[in-house]
Structures are given as C-alpha cells and as structure tokens.
Image (tube, rainbow, N blue to C red):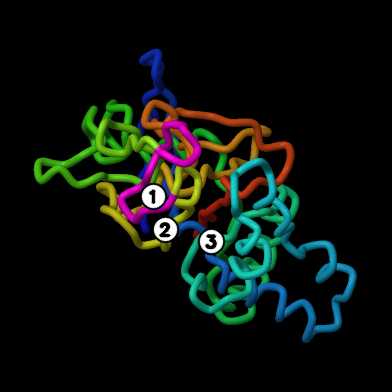
Amino acid sequence: MKVPAGKVWTANEKQDSTSEFYISSTEVTNIQWREFLMYLKQEGETDEYKANILDTTVWRQGLGDTEPFVNYYYQHQAYSEYPAVGMTLKQAKAYAHWLTEIYSLKNQGVKITFSVPTKKQWIRAARGDETMRYPWGGPYLRNSKGLYLANFKSYDASTIHYNDESKKYEIITPDGFIDDAIITAPGKSYFPNQFGVYNMSGNVAELVSDDAVAMGGSWNDTGYDVRVESEQPAAEPKSTIGFRVIAVIE
C-alpha cells in the first residue's frame, strides 16, 4: 500500500517528515516465510536456510498451555495466513533482502528495494495524517457497533469466571478458552487504516530496523499497550513479535 510523503506526529507533538514509500498491507505471514525458506533450500543456500529457520519454541515463553502451537503454528496450513513470529531482526532483514533480489529478477526495468521499516516510517504508516493513539484515528478500541478494532487482550466483567473446582477467578475469552489461549489472527483481520494497512495495533508487535523494539503491541497486550507508539523490547524472538516490509521504488 502506498504511503505518501508526509509528517510524522509523535506523542509529544513533535513532527518529522518521511519520503514516499510502500508498505505491505499485512504482517509477513507463515506461508510467505515458508516460501522464503523453500527458495533458499532449492538454491542450495544451506547455511542461509539454517540461519533463517524460525524459533517455534517461543510459544513456550510462559503463555499457558500453548505447546500445540510449537508444533503446528508455523507448519500447519490452517495458520498459513497468520503472521510469522519467532524471528530476530537480522532474520527479518534477510527476508527483505531476499524480496529485493526476487523482484530485481522479475522487474529488471524497475529498481525496488525492500526493507524493514524504520520507527519513523512505521509510525507514519500506522498513524497516517492523524494524531490519535490508534491507527483507526480514534481514542476507542471498539467501533459504534461494539466490535473490537484490534486483536489484543481485553478484560471486562463478562470475561471473569469463578472456577468452583480450583476456587479461583479466571479470565475466559469469548471462545471459551482461558486467558492466554487467544493468539494471533490472520493478517487481513479487523479493519484497515486510511492507507489500507491491517493490524498496525495489536495482533503482533512489529520490528523496526533502527531500534531493538517492536511497535504497536500484540495479541497478548492490553488496550493501552497497543497504541501506535507502544514499544516492547525485541532483542530476542517472541511469539508476540512479527514484522512487515516496506518498499521504495527508484
């Protein structure tokens, strides 16, 4: 999706500018990452292939009963359109470099460079021309019909349940799973922002190229932590962190 040159508004009302670029409408998905690895394997780039295998054990990072996702989230076709997780920034940049090579072979008359966005570019694509805290331009997490506008961890009175067996209060999701069992959603879920970009808040926090953080919050963060400028440490791969790419046409 095209992001025109424009101003970046930050939380403390500072401004900066960005040049025009394009950004993927969704986070990089599992099937896209599998295509990347398949290409490396077919081309005999064994070292590169091994270096870019995702860390599926990130689903064991204190998230409750998520062991099935260790085995199935990345591999199973049911999750093909879900965002890839478990990569480092170095691996994300390797994916973007591969895309640049592929497109140079297909479009020899046009130079297209793919990369992981900088923080400034990411905020510009997420916020657009607005100064609001969320990509959809408002201060609320639901629309006028009461539907959630992002994938995040929500708590209210309707989700609290008293378990007579354990004698404890539990958080129950609308699908009946306890607390952290809700994970990511497919890339094209909820509603796009003014640039046609999905899930810039929630779903997975997204890596940026110029800092060791991921932006926008994830499925495992509360509403306050899925603001456009929400940051979380990203030095290590996590089940809550993915990324998307941008492209510059020269």
The type of residue carrying mark 2 is Ala
Select label 3 or label 2 by which is in front: 2
Q: Is residue 229 above or below residue 30?
A: above
Residue under the point 10% across and 46% down: 145
**Quadrant of the image for the N terminus?**
bottom left
Report which residue position mark 1 lands on.
Answer: 199
- 231 w.r.t. 185: above or below: above
Question: Is 236 left, or right, of 141 in this rendering?
Answer: right
Which residue is situated farthest in the bottom direction here?
42
Q: Are marks 1 and 3 in contact (CB under 8 Å)?
A: no
Does the CB distance between marks 3 and 2 fall below 8 Å?
no
Q: Residue at x 53, y 79 (%)?
A: 77
Residue underneath mark 3: 28
Name above or below for residue 7 compared with residue 239. Answer: above
Q: Badge 1: few (under 14), some or many (20 or more) residues near its Cα, within 10 Å? A: many
| Amino acid found under the numbered disc labelled 3 | Val
Which label belongs to residue 174?
Answer: none
Q: Is residue 169 magenta?
A: yes
Q: Position of residue 241 (x, y in %)?
A: 58, 46
User: Which numbered tag is attached to residue 185?
Assistant: 2
| Magenta residues, dominant SS class | loop
Check whether the beta carbons of the residues at disc 1 and disc 2 lie within 8 A of each other.
yes
Q: Position of residue 246 (x, y in %)?
A: 51, 54
Q: Nearer the viewer, residue 224 or 72?
A: 72
Percent of width and height locating residue 31: 56, 74
Give the SS element for disc 3.
loop
**Residue stretch in magenta:** 163-177
